[in-house]
Image (cartoon, rainbow, N blue to C red):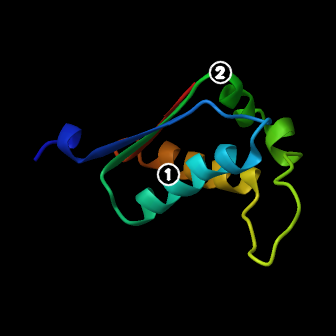
Amino acid sequence: MDAADNSILYVASHGMEDSYRATLIFAAANAAVQKGAGLVRVALLGEATWLVNPAIARNFSLGPLTQYPRPQLFDLISKFLTFATSNTDKAAIGV
């Protein structure tokens, strides 16, 4: 089985207008990486491209807090980018 057979591509087009969907893409990508799902890639389109701006990601609002803790967008992006830069054969992000 080659890398193309064992890869996941997450595509995001939601940004600041939908905090749940914007955060979900990075939560899913990080989970796939942790499970060793093969090559995990994230493609950001349209409004989602703004999310990799550190100033925006740090101040990104996830909406009202609920009884379930939510990870912060900046932390999710940082975690994925850290993994991707040290494991280029296992993860990548494209804007």
Q: Position of residue 83 (x, y in %)?
A: 51, 52
Labels 2, 1: front one: 2
Compared across the picture, whether 4 is left or right of 92 comes to left
Tell me the kind of residue under disc 2. Gly
Which residue is found at the position 44% from the left and 64% from the top? 34
Asked if the residue at tag 1 contacts the one at tag 2, i.e. Cβ–Cβ closer than 8 Å, the answer is no
Which residue is found at the position 49% from the left and 51% from the top? 29
Q: In terms of depth relative to the viewer, which is nearer, 20 or 35?
A: 20
Image mark for residue 29: 1
Compared across the picture, whether 37 is left or right of 84 comes to left
SS for tag 2? helix
Pick whichever of labels 2 and 1 is earlier in the sequence. 1
Q: In terms of depth relative to the viewer, which is nearer, 83 or 57?
A: 57
Assess disc 1: are there few (<14), some (14-19) or many (≥20) residues with their C-alpha within 10 Å of its C-alpha: many
According to the picture, the residue beneath numbered tag 2 turns out to be 46
Q: Position of residue 40 (x, y in %)?
A: 40, 46
Could you tell me which quadrant the C terminus lies in? top right
SS for tag 1? helix
